[in-house]
Image (cartoon, grey):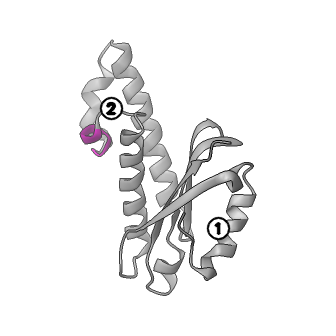
Amino acid sequence: MFHFPRNRTERCSEVAMSIPRLSAMTSCRLSVGRECLSSDDCFRLFSKLLNLFLYETGQFPDYVLIQKPKSAYEHLRCSKETAARKAVRFLDSLHEIEQHISALPLSVEYFLILAGGLPSHPKRAFLIDFSSSLSSGGLPIYSHVNLCDG
């Protein structure tokens, strides 16, 4: 188990304690950069991590298509296949989420992705922490939290 540096521990604990069962999960972290990032850079990095997460967890099967702009999958809208229509709805929802996040007036320091089960009982949680990267030039952190059995 990896621990957050002391200055982040309190903030991350507040997030974790607000979600039932997160205290029973193990966590690890991965540094994803060394320089201070702008809000736009943080958003782009979050989008890449979200796309990778959706692909790696099997929630969307085409990693190349998930990264393309909305205009790149217009041909799927004309398809009568159920799989194509589902893919279009999924990609439209993803692009809408990205637009809402990019339009936020303040910089976002944390992104929390919950996966599996209900939001109140997630199987996995991913916390992406850009707080020190935005303020002091520290490392943005990608944290992966797994549910512990038992």
Residue at the spot of label 2:
61
The x and y percentages for residue 72 are 24, 38
The x and y percentages for residue 70 are 32, 40
**Residue 65 is covered by the magenta coloring:** yes
Residue at the spot of label 1:
12
Seen at 47% across and 65% down, the residue is 29
Outermost residue toward the front in this view: 150
Q: CA distance from mark 2 to mark 1?
A: 31 Å
| Kind of residue at badge 2 | Pro
- The secondary structure type at the circle numbered 1 is helix
Please tell me whether residue 100 is drawn above or below residue 1 in the rendered image.
above
Seen at 36% across and 48% down, the residue is 52
Please tell me whether residue 56 is drawn above or below residue 39 in the rendered image.
above
- Left or right: 41 with respect to 98? left
- The secondary structure type at the circle numbered 2 is loop
The x and y percentages for residue 5 are 57, 79
The one of 115 and 4 positioned closer to us in this rendering: 4
| Kind of residue at badge 1 | Cys
Q: Magenta residues?
A: 63-68
The one of 78 and 9 positioned closer to us in this rendering: 9
Seen at 42% across and 50% down, the residue is 50
Instruction: Indicate the quadrant where residue 8 lies.
Output: bottom right
> Upstream in the sequence, badge 2 or badge 1?
1
Q: Quadrant of the C terminus?
A: top right
Magenta segment, prevailing SS (helix, strand or loop) = helix
Residue neighbourhood size for the residue with mark 2, other residues' Cα within 10 Å, grouped as few (<14), some (14–19), many (≥20): few
Seen at 75% across and 57% down, the residue is 18
Instruction: Indicate the quadrant where residue 45 lies.
Output: bottom left
